[in-house]
Image (cartoon, rainbow, N blue to C red):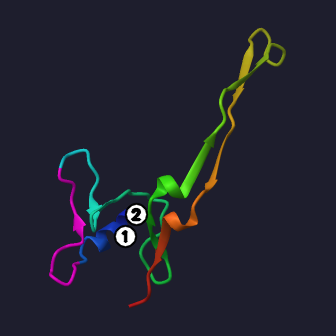
Amino acid sequence: MLNRRTQAAVRKLKDETGDYLWAPPAVAGQSASLMGFPVAESEDMPDIAADAFAIAFGDFRRFYLVVDRAGVRVLRDPYSAKPYVLFYTTKRVGGGIQDFDAAKLLKFAAS
């Protein structure tokens, strides 16, 4: 996972044989790959810079767990906005890191 500016810098990287590490998607609708692994774009990631954790790499399905409680609660309020009836809905959702070893953040050094 990385943002567009970091993606632009990573696209220029080559291995020791001169091949690019970045590969564009082979078919429309698929994602690009970096060293054979799929790439996800997120503008919430920081730009590539010295001492910045600009790339997150790993298996995010194992890394993060989303907990979604079953059911939606509905509260009927016939008193607040007469002659209308208001409905308030709530749903409990949470999440957290499940396996710290499943993903790593890459930190860049100053060149």
The local secondary structure at tag 1 comes to: helix
| Image side of residue 94 versus residue 4, left or right | right
Give the residue drawn at x 57%, y 61%. Answer: 99
Q: Residue furthest top?
A: 83
**Quadrant of the drawing holding the N terminus:** bottom left
Magenta region, residue range: 14-26
Q: Report the predominant secondary structure element of the magenta stretch.
A: loop
**Badge 1 is on which residue?**
6
Q: How many marks?
A: 2
Residue 40 position within the rendered picture, expressed as x and y whole percent measured from the top left: 38, 56
Q: In this view, does 31 lie above or below 104?
A: above
Residue 46, given in percent of the width and then of the height, sits at 48, 69
- Judge whether 6 appears above or below 70 on screen: below
On the image, the x and y values in percent for residue 65 come to 58, 50
Q: Which mark is residue 52?
A: none
Please determine whether, in this image, residue 15 is positioned above or below residue 81.
below
Q: Are marks 2 and 1 in contact (CB under 8 Å)?
A: yes
Relative to 54, say whether 27 is above or below. above
Residue at the location (29% across, 53% down)?
31
Few, some or many residues within 10 Å of mark 1 (<14, 14–19, 20+): some
Q: In this view, does 7 lie to the left or right of 90?
A: left
How far apart are labels 2 and 1 at the CA level? 5 Å
Residue type highlighted by circle 2: Asn
Residue 3 circle label: 2
